[in-house]
Image: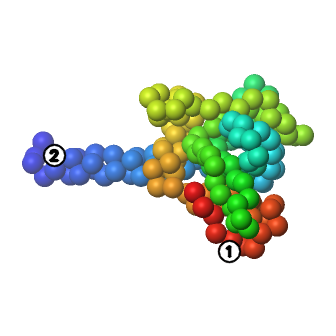
């Protein structure tokens, strides 16, 4: 082999690795119609009691479906969520608790019903749980969303303002 052949081979290998890395980082494809059908069911379940009870507070959640997998006749819906607890406070709103991160929601096929919600542990073990419970591309997308934020707080706040009958520009204290 000549040095030129070796150089071309090296360039091709590096190029293929680069393409593979870019493809790996793409979010998994999600059936938008199915995501649209399951999201309100997931949202209602998450808001029903919130991650924990806070006297006088009402939970509002926002979620983005990251992936949906069919498994054993059920749907495994991987979501990135943010849930904040709000109370009214002198004509405004105040957050009194919150949680954000990944969840894996097991659901029935249509009619959709939540069977189980799995949440990763806080702190140590969180990233590992995500990697074990999401597809490779789904886990990468969840990690990206967690690291960069995702606008979910604005969505939850808008829902809270609307539910409490407050103007869209009502300030929120933290």
Q: Nearer the viewer, residue 113 or 48?
A: 48
Q: Residue at x 60, y 44 (%)?
A: 99
Q: Nearer the viewer, residue 170 or 24?
A: 170
| CB within 8 Å, label 1 to label 2 | no
Q: Residue at x 59, y 40 (%)?
A: 102
Q: Which mark is residue 6?
A: 2
98 lies left or right of 143: right
Q: Nearer the viewer, mark 1 or mark 2?
A: 1
Structural distance between the alpha carbons of marks 1 and 2 = 63 Å
Q: Is residue 139 visible?
A: yes
155 lies left or right of 128: right
| Helix, strand or loop under label 2 | helix
Q: Is residue 64 visible?
A: no
Q: Position of residue 168 (x, y in %)?
A: 72, 73
Of all residues, the one furthest to the front in this rendering is: 90
Q: Determine crowd level at label 1: few under 14, some 14-19, many 20+ residues with C-alpha closer than 10 A.
A: few
Viewport quadrant of the N terminus: top left
Of all residues, the one furthest to the top in this rendering is: 72
Up the image or down, 126 lies above or below 26; here it is above
| Helix, strand or loop under label 1 | loop
Q: Position of residue 119 (x, y in %)?
A: 62, 32
Q: Position of residue 44 (x, y in %)?
A: 80, 45
Q: Position of residue 121 (x, y in %)?
A: 54, 29
Q: Nearer the viewer, residue 82 or 14?
A: 82
Viewport quadrant of the C terminus: bottom right
Q: Quadrant of residue 73?
A: top right
- The residue labelled by disc 1 is 169
Q: Residue at x 57, y 35 (%)?
A: 134
Q: Nearer the viewer, residue 132 or 121?
A: 121
Q: How many marks?
A: 2
């Amino acid at each position: 082999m000549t040095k030129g052949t070796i150089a071309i081979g090296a360039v091709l290998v590096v190029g293929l690795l680069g393409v593979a890395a870019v493809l790996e980082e793409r979010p998994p494809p999600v059936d938008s119609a199915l995501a649209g059908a399951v999201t309100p069911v997931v949202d209602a379940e998450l808001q029903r009691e919130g991650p924990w009870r806070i006297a006088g507070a009402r939970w509002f959640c926002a979620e983005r479906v990251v992936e949906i997998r069919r498994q054993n006749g059920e749907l495994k819906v991987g979501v990135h969520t943010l849930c904040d607890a709000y109370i009214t406070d002198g004509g405004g709103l105040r957050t009194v608790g919150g949680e954000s991160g990944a969840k894996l929601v097991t659901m029935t096929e249509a009619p959709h019903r939540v069977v189980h919600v799995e949440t990763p542990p806080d702190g140590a073990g969180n990233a590992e749980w995500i990697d074990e419970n999401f597809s490779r591309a789904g886990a990468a997308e969840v990690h990206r969303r967690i690291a960069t934020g995702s606008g979910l707080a604005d969505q939850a706040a808008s829902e809270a303002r609307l539910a409490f009958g407050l103007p869209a520009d009502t300030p929120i204290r933290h």
